[in-house]
Amino acid sequence: MKKSLLAILLAVGLICGSMTGCGGSTVAGNTQNDVNTSMESGAISGDADLLMYTVNDRGLNVRDDNYRTCYEVFVYSFWDSNSDGIGDLNGLIQKLDYINDGNDETDKDLGCNAIWLMPVMPSTTYHKYDVMDYYDIDPEYGTLDDFKRLVEECHARGINVIMDLVMNHTSSRHEWFRSACEYLDSLEPGQTPDEAVCPYVGYYNFTDKAQGNFHQVGDTEWFYEGQFWSEMPDLNLANKNVRQEFEDIARYWLELGVDGFRLDAVKEFYSGSTEKNIEVLSWFNDAVKSIKADTYLVGEVWEDYNGCSKYYESGLDSFFDFSFADSTGYISKVLNGNAKSGASTYGKAIEAVNDTILQYTDNYIDAPFYSNHDLARSAGYYSGEYAEEKVKMGHAMNLLMSGNAFIYYGEELGMKGSGRDENKRVGMYWSENTNMVGVCAGPVDADTVEMIYPSLEVQQEDPGSIYNYVKQAIKLRNIYPEIARGTMTFHQELSNDQVCVFTKEYEGSQLMIIFNLSENENAVDLSGISLNGKDAGNVEEAGMLQTSGAGVRIDGSRVIMPAYSVEIIK
């Protein structure tokens, strides 16, 4: 939200405050002082956009730790600085102020304070998950000097940099693999490979027996494991030399200023063996933390929380919380009316995830996310009359969870993309003018994707847009450390199939977050509830997210919530 636009909205609010018919039963003089008074003062309603910006107009309290709001960037499709149609590091640098301008006094940026870079190392593919060289930058994206400048510019804005690190496999064109294959090709039939002659033959899983997901080495009698693709040979992570290689690789990038790593496909290190995978992760976690103690590590275990939680035994900071993501996750299930307990399912699920992880560790950072480069974009999860409201509420449910929350580029605009992977990774929707200088062409094999919602240049001028709603949700994370770091208590007695209520406590401070996840107005009776030592009649409104012109009303201890809204009190 631009300051000028906010000023206009506030001016309109002052006019509406003294008139009827301005979007609900408006309280006269709905100024900042009125909003900051306790809920005892009565109804706060009116235009939802105006109220959201007014109520949330508070100073930020951003902490410098690993509880952040992380923006996943596919560099290829983000912003193109040299007019070749492909995004690059210099293009990302040019757009960093969009993610975070580093100035808490402005309100023009998203407010994310970390970025996850999908792979940027040299590769044969557009997605770059087949790495040819772990010590360089793909020429399509730029140079090492460009990367160093990116890290410097990010840190100047308070943005941490998390790199995608692919340890499960390399490219078939990596020098390790090429050397190993050349050596195997030189062997006589029946001759046993000798690592003393060619160490790289021990870097991969070679065998002389054909089996599933193994591929032949040329015309030889040898085969290698490649679970994902023949051009992605799997590494042998039990090999001490391979482990030393990755310790050196991690040290190299950490010394260049990287703040952490996203570890790809960790449950496929040893497909089907959780214990072996945990051992690998334990080794890597210990090795990396010995180099830089506050390095942030997040792993991809594509399972629900029951399957993923045990991986926390490895000591890794985070694992992505797949239970809430995708069209089959708890968020979309609740919003689409497919959850057994309705809105209460959301709170119960958060509680269940926490309780399950605590069986393995009490020192973890959850990693909630809603969609990513492998999943259909979330705007496509919903249809019908309330589709846009559900899109917005889905983001609120993701971003108001505890942990290090992730948002995939373009999700803040409600971008669309499903089906083949390329469709999920199309060019960032900066403008309806796809010929605008800097706009990326996106993957060559992507289908034509017709967007549902407008581009950034349209949405940023609309206070009721998905983009501005997501900005407000992120802002609440940056105002209240309790949101990301707090211990959550689900209030089942206040929740039902349409409303979910929970509190979060951090450093002795409590916040209550109330979600109305339905198309109906709902009332929540807080009688008997104490928050920060205050009873229901004296707690304060702390934040708001709304999707319509209806506002929250307070009737004694009852909080009357409009459809698809979030209320935060303290």
Image (cartoon, rainbow, N blue to C red):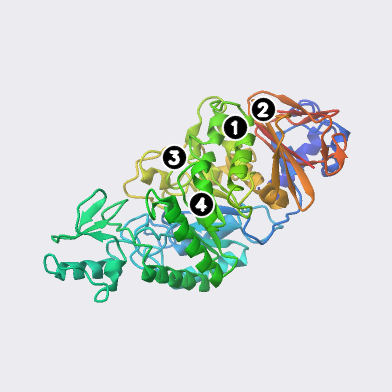
How far apart marks 4 and 2 lie (CA) works out to 39 Å
Residue to which mark 3 is pinned? 376
The residue drawn where x is 26% and y is 68% is 201
Q: Is residue 296 left or right of residue 238?
A: right
- In the rendered structure, are the residues bearing label 4 and label 1 in contact, judged by CB atoms less than 8 Å apart? no
The label shown at residue 482 is: none
Mark closer to the chain start, 4 or 3:
4
User: Farthest residue toward the left?
Assistant: 189
In depth, the one of 197 and 132 nearer the eye is 197
Instruction: Specify the amino acid type for callout 3.
Output: Ala
Residue to which mark 1 is pinned? 389
Residue 535 in the image, given as x and y percentages of width and height: 87, 36
The label shown at residue 311 is: 4
In depth, the one of 291 and 159 nearer the eye is 291
- In the rendered structure, are the residues bearing label 2 and label 3 in contact, judged by CB atoms less than 8 Å apart? no
The residue drawn where x is 61% and y is 48% is 358
Q: Is residue 367 left or right of residue 276?
A: right
